[in-house]
Amino acid sequence: MKKQVGIEALAIAVPRRYVDIEELARARGVDPAKYTAGLGAKEMAVADPGEDAVALAATAAARLLRTHAVDPAKLGMLVVGTETGVDHSKPVASHVQGLLKLPTSMRVYDAQHACYGGTAGLMAAVEWIASGAAAGRSALVVCSDIARYGLNTAGEPTQGGGAVALLVSEQPDLLAVDVGLNGSCSMDVYDFWRPIGRREAVVDGHYSIKCYTDALSGAYRNWRERALAHEVVRWGSTMPGEQLARILYHVPFCKMARKAHTQLRLCDIEDAPNAPPSTPEAREEKAKSSASYTAQVASSLDLNARVGNVYTASLYLALAGLLNTEGGALAGQRVGLLSYGSGCASEFYSGVVGDKAAKRMATTNVEAVMAKRERVSVEEYERIMRLPYEAPEPLSPEPGEFRLAEIRDHKRHYIQGA
Ligand code: HMG
């Protein structure tokens, strides 16, 4: 039997505070429906300077190792996907390795390409294991980011933060990746970027949506060509994309997943062999199908709507949300995943949900993590946003969680809640 490789277990970490999105809209003099119906948001995570990409990554990784009783000696690789690292040279992954006291006999590094960095790390881990080079060892891949555009900007309601830690192994209880079917599409574009020294991203918002959907089309068509060749999907009474039980998208804001799904369907509609002639308007209308969106996409978006954009972790937060609610029902079924990172890079891949997904997600207990959060007012959110980056408030971390305590001699010092 061919070796199975994929995600065995996952854990999430989110900032301790969040703001209600309707309250934010009212404070900005915007119709709340623009943020809820127009962008698909409900709440937005608010990270303070003590909750940086290292603290969130270490918290998620420690939670993963603890709750799923992972033996650190069996790990051979640690990759952190992030675009909000804390140093130009020392990777977030080294901090995580030290904070978790992981073995030294590991490959440890960060992967950066905007929101795509996490998927870059995941695929390096999957292919390392599939190649046999891992020799039975597992990999830890952590996606950790803080999405920040600044107060009173168009991007403000699409901020957020958090981390998702993934255990990658030959026992893919959550998702066995269809190794070798991945489709990629990358282009040199200026849609979203963050020049050195800036805390806030610069973004050409509407153009970024077009870059995302263009890249999606390339990556999906590339995957579909391979999936058709391997008879994983086929042209028939249903289109190839419709043969995936669910499709997960990179979620900068929830409405983007709807736009992405329309674009993916349009690729199938336009490319279908022997399709009867139709107008562009009719094809667009068919692509927009609410029934398809409800059946294939909507159930993965609950956590994203409550956290906001988590850059590298957004797609994996959607995976956590989907498996949390439907892990049992989807066992044995194939799902598609679309990763997008501005700049830009995208990858479409597929995988089969494992039989133990529901059991694993019950152990992970994402609801318990979400329930501990505290809602803050818009005034408090604005105060937190204005705090200096180098001087975290002296707050005690929750038991098991990490927090930046201080920066001394340009070195960052973290504490863990007892
Ligand atoms: P905007 O210009 O303020 O909003 O910024 P808008 O005018 O486009 O309105 C947004 C939606 O709300 C529209 O829906 C409106 O119709 C609707 P759509 O037509 O698009 O379906 N709307 C309303 N609905 C109901 N009631 C109302 C109402 N008013 C308007 N009263 C934008 C929106 C997303 C551009 C902005 O928030 C932004 O710049 N966000 C950041 C960029 C971003 O998220 N881009 C996504 C693609 S790029 C990506 O995903 C990569 C990224 O994650 C970074 C990385 O890779 O590292 C960002």
Image (cartoon, rainbow, N blue to C red):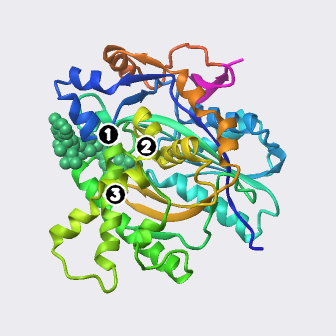
Q: Main secondary structure of the magenta part?
A: strand
Taking the spot 59% from the left edge, 56% from the top edge, the residue there is 121
Residue farthest toward the front in the current orientation of the protein: 237
Local packing at callout 1 (Cα closer than 10 Å; few below 14, some 14-19, many 20+) is: many
Residue type (three-letter) at the residue carrying disc 3: Ala
What kind of element bears circle 3? helix
Give how far across and how far down residue 316 sits, in percent.
53, 47
Give how far across and how far down residue 301 sits, in percent.
43, 43
Q: Which mark is residue 260?
A: 3
Q: Is residue 403 magenta?
A: yes
**Residue 62 as seen in the image, left or right of residue 231:** right
Q: Nearer the viewer, residue 97 or 155?
A: 155
First in sequence: mark 2 vs mark 1: 1
For the residues bearing labels 3 and 2, Cβ distance under 8 angstroms: no
What kind of element bears circle 2? loop
Q: Which mark is residue 301?
A: 2
Residue type (three-letter) at the residue carrying disc 1: Gly
Give how far across and how far down residue 14 sits, in percent.
52, 31
Local packing at callout 2 (Cα closer than 10 Å; few below 14, some 14-19, many 20+) is: many
Rendered position, 181 above or below 40? below
Q: Which residues are magenta?
A: 399-418
> Ligand 1 is found in which quarter of the picture?
top left
Looking at mark 1, is its residue's CB closer than 8 Å to ligand 1? Answer: no
First in sequence: mark 3 vs mark 1: 1
Q: CA distance from mark 3 to mark 2?
A: 13 Å
Q: Is residue 204 visible?
A: no
For the residues bearing labels 2 and 1, Cβ distance under 8 angstroms: yes
Residue type (three-letter) at the residue carrying disc 2: Leu
**In which quadrant of the rendered image does the N terminus lie?**
bottom right
**Residue 239 as seen in the image, left or right of residue 144:** left
Q: Is residue 129 visible?
A: yes
